[in-house]
Image (tube, rainbow, N blue to C red):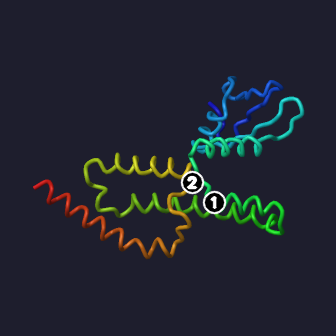
């Protein structure tokens, strides 16, 4: 059994082929993207020099998805990133992006937790299947990141009553449909 607490080590051979050291087979960039979407950390190193190539390959994965029309990053964000390489913002941008993604991950787990606790629809037949489908949809749409962009605790609390009201209305409509 693989130790998933450590990064998955991928070695790049001189032929540019990528080798998964856990399964002893060759992998593609899409395989690496799937490992990451599944929550696995990866580290890609050059076999000969030992150089860490992880950043280079992650950027390549992003570029390939963007070029296939799977756009996640708006042009203005990409433009700002390019500008940040030549400005004073270069020192602030990495910390800002890391903090933003931390907030997204935190928001996702809080949203999923809220969906499963104190939910009047939880007793409805098929609710678990619907929730699983929603989680898969959120994961697919956000590449494993949070579905609620920047959802802070205060805004989640403010919206909780609205969500409960909408759920009650939905339950009422469902009850009317079954009669």
Q: Position of residue 100 (x, y in %)?
A: 64, 64
Query: Looking at the image, how many numbered discs can be counted on the residues?
Result: 2
Residue drawn at 64 percent across, 39 percent down: 4
The residue at which mark 2 appears reads as 145
Q: Are marks 2 and 1 in contact (CB under 8 Å)?
A: yes
Badge 2: few (under 14), some or many (20 or more) residues near its Cα, within 10 Å? many
**Quarter of the view holding residue 49:** top right
Q: Is residue 174 left or right of residue 130?
A: left
For the residues labelled 2 and 1, the Cα–Cα distance comes to 8 Å
In terms of depth relative to the viewer, which is nearer, 141 or 50?
Answer: 141
Q: Which comes before the other along the chain, label 2 or label 1?
A: 1
Q: Is residue 154 left or right of residue 118?
A: right
Q: Which label belongs to residue 76?
A: none
Q: Quadrant of the N terminus?
A: top right
Q: Quadrant of the C terminus?
A: bottom left
Q: Is residue 11 left or right of residue 150?
A: right
In terms of depth relative to the viewer, which is nearer, 140 or 47?
Answer: 140
The residue at which mark 1 appears reads as 101
Q: Is residue 83 left or right of residue 121?
A: right
Residue drawn at 30 percent across, 67 percent down: 166
Badge 1: few (under 14), some or many (20 or more) residues near its Cα, within 10 Å? some
In terms of depth relative to the viewer, which is nearer, 99 or 123?
Answer: 99
Q: Position of residue 110 (x, y in %)?
A: 50, 62
Q: Secondary structure at mark 2?
A: loop
Residue drawn at 17 percent across, 59 percent down: 175
Q: Position of residue 92 (x, y in %)?
A: 78, 67
- Which residue extends farthest left? 179
Residue drawn at 26 percent across, 66 percent down: 168
Please say if 54 is above or below 28: below
Q: Position of residue 77 (x, y in %)?
A: 66, 61
Q: Secondary structure at mark 1?
A: helix
């Amino acid at each position: 059994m693989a130790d998933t607490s450590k990064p998955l080590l991928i070695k790049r051979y001189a032929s540019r082929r990528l080798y998964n050291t856990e399964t002893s087979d060759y992998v593609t960039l899409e395989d690496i993207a799937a490992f990451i979407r599944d929550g696995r950390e990866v580290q890609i190193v050059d076999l000969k020099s030992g150089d860490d190539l992880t950043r280079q390959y992650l950027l390549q994965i992003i570029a390939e998805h963007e070029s296939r029309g799977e756009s996640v990053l708006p042009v203005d964000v990409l433009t700002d990133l390019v500008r940040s390489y030549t400005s004073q913002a270069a020192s602030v941008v990495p910390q800002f992006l890391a903090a933003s993604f931390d907030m997204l991950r935190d928001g996702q787990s809080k949203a999923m937790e809220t969906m499963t606790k104190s939910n009047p629809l939880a007793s409805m037949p098929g609710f678990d299947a619907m929730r699983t489908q929603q989680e898969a949809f959120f994961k697919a749409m956000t590449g494993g990141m949070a579905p609620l962009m920047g959802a802070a605790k205060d805004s989640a609390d403010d919206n909780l009553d609205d969500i409960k009201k909408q759920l009650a209305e939905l339950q009422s409509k469902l009850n009317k449909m079954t009669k």
